[in-house]
């Protein structure tokens, strides 16, 4: 009976250690993002704890301060999960050799993973396991040392563009503010030069936020800014420019919309967010015609050139927006983005949104434009 228990312990220990290694390698080493159950459950546990901490906070600013720590804390908890998993898995392997009881096996595992050597192994089997655990422990430390600077380097590049957009489009950013400011400072005729940088930003966003999905939950330095609402602002501004502004043809804006739509869909696919991957051109969107007309009226009042056929403007805008409408709203719900016109304000507000049961606001505006 004892022999059978030791065999079971050896198998269980090997399964735990390989699960840790799979999680670490897929999270840090594999360039293509691959989710693992250990990583997933670590983040879900951390999200539950932060939901509980923010549950009774009355203001958005209080909740924002709490959730700003969610992603960094989750990374630390993931490292702790790797260490504890390795420690416990090798403790089972040491106990399966029959040289020590389980408390001493835990001591030996702790001695091996930290390479301190305060508890010596017995026999060749334990020598081999101690060396293997030492290598794994050092490897995990090396992965973390290389992983954190990579994460923060990508975050810094992402946020530089978000902060730059705040200057041009406000905080929270809106397409109305962006286009109005470009007109006031005389940049509207050269706005086509703006889109190439955002196309590059969306391309890096897709690559980095699926390879390192923790970045999705890193929040911006300003409480009313977010990478996802910035993406929505840029995409809406590009869609309005292409569909409604009487300017020279701007293929750069069209390409930016496509790059942004593909990036948001890829991130949704990684997190298994239920969206329509190929919506129909005439599918409904979260923006209403009345809102769109109010925005065009405001732009026209400020002197921007608006195309004469408003019906065609609306059809063209809706045709562009449908490509990114659903993934934009879904990701706003996933990260609990700050309320921003035409993106996160479309969501019915409830604590910890459940993506599988998400609902979009469909009631038309009554008194004032929502932009």
Image (cartoon, rainbow, N blue to C red):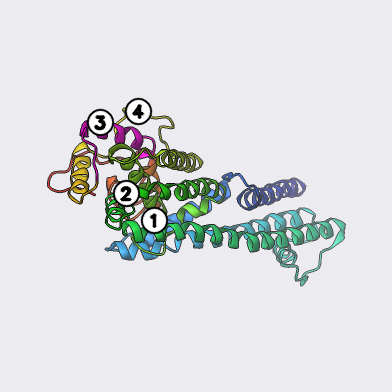
Mark 2–mark 4 distance (CA, rounded to whole Å): 22 Å
Please report the residue visible at 72 percent of the width from the left and 56 percent of the height from the top. Answer: 90
Label 1: which secondary element: loop
What residue is pinned by disc 1?
Answer: 226
Q: Residues within 10 Å of mark 1 (few under 14, many from 20)?
A: many
Q: Residue 88: x and y, percent?
A: 66, 57
> Distance of mark 1 from mark 4, alpha carbons?
28 Å
Alpha-carbon distance for marks 2 and 1? Answer: 10 Å
Is residue 308 located in the magenta-colored stretch of the structure?
yes
Q: Earlier in the sequence, mark 1 or mark 3?
A: 1
Q: Which residue is mark 3?
A: 312
Asked which secondary structure carries label 3, the reply is helix
* Left or right of 181, for residue 368: left
Is label 3 or label 2 in front? Answer: 3
* Local SS, label 4: loop
The residue lying at 42 percent from left, 47 percent from top is 195
- Write down the region rendered in magenta: 305-326
Label 3, label 2: how far apart the Cα atoms are: 26 Å
The residue to which callout 2 is attached is 344
Circles 2 and 1: CB atoms closer than 8 Å: yes
Badge 4 crowding class, 10 Å Cα cut-off, few under 14, some 14 to 19, many 20 or more, is some
In the image, taking residue 295 as reference, residue 168 lies left or right, namely: right
From mark 1 to mark 3, how far is it between C-alphas? Answer: 32 Å
The answer to whether residue 225 is seen in the rendering is no
In the image, residue 217 lies in the stretch drawn in magenta: no
**Which residue corresponds to mark 4?**
281
């Amino acid at each position: 009976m004892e022999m059978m228990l030791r065999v079971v312990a050896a198998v269980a220990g090997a399964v735990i250690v390989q699960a840790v290694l799979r999680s670490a390698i897929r999270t840090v080493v594999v360039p293509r993002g691959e989710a693992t159950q250990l990583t997933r459950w670590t983040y879900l546990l951390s999200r539950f704890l932060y939901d509980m901490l923010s549950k009774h906070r009355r203001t958005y600013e209080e909740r924002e301060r709490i959730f700003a720590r969610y992603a960094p804390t989750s990374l630390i908890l993931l490292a702790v999960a790797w260490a504890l998993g390795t420690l416990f898995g090798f403790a089972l392997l040491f106990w399966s050799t029959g040289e020590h009881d389980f408390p001493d096996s835990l001591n030996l595992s702790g001695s091996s993973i930290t390479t301190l050597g305060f508890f010596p192994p017995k026999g060749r089997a334990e020598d081999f396991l101690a060396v293997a655990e030492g290598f794994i422990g050092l490897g995990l430390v090396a992965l973390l040392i290389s992983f954190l600077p990579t994460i923060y380097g990508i975050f810094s590049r992402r946020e530089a563009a978000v902060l730059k957009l705040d200057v041009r489009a406000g905080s929270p950013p809106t397409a109305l503010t962006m286009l109005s400011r470009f007109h006031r400072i005389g940049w509207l005729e050269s706005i086509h030069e703006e889109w190439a940088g955002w196309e590059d930003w969306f391309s890096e966003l897709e690559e980095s936020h699926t390879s390192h999905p923790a970045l999705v939950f890193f929040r911006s330095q300003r409480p009313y800014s977010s990478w996802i609402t910035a993406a929505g602002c840029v995409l809406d501004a590009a869609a309005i420019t292409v569909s409604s502004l009487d300017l020279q043809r701007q293929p750069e804006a069209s390409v930016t919309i496509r790059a942004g739509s593909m990036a948001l869909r890829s991130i949704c696919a990684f997190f298994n967010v239920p969206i329509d991957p190929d919506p129909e051109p005439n599918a409904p969107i979260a923006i209403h015609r009345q809102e769109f007309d109010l925005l065009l009226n405001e732009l026209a009042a400020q002197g921007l050139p608006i195309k004469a056929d408003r019906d065609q403007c609306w059809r063209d805008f809706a045709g562009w927006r449908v490509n990114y409408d659903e993934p934009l709203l879904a990701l706003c719900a996933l990260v609990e983005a700050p309320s921003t016109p035409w993106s996160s304000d479309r969501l019915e507000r409830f604590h910890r949104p459940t993506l599988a049961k998400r609902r979009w606001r469909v009631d038309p505006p009554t008194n004032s434009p929502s932009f």
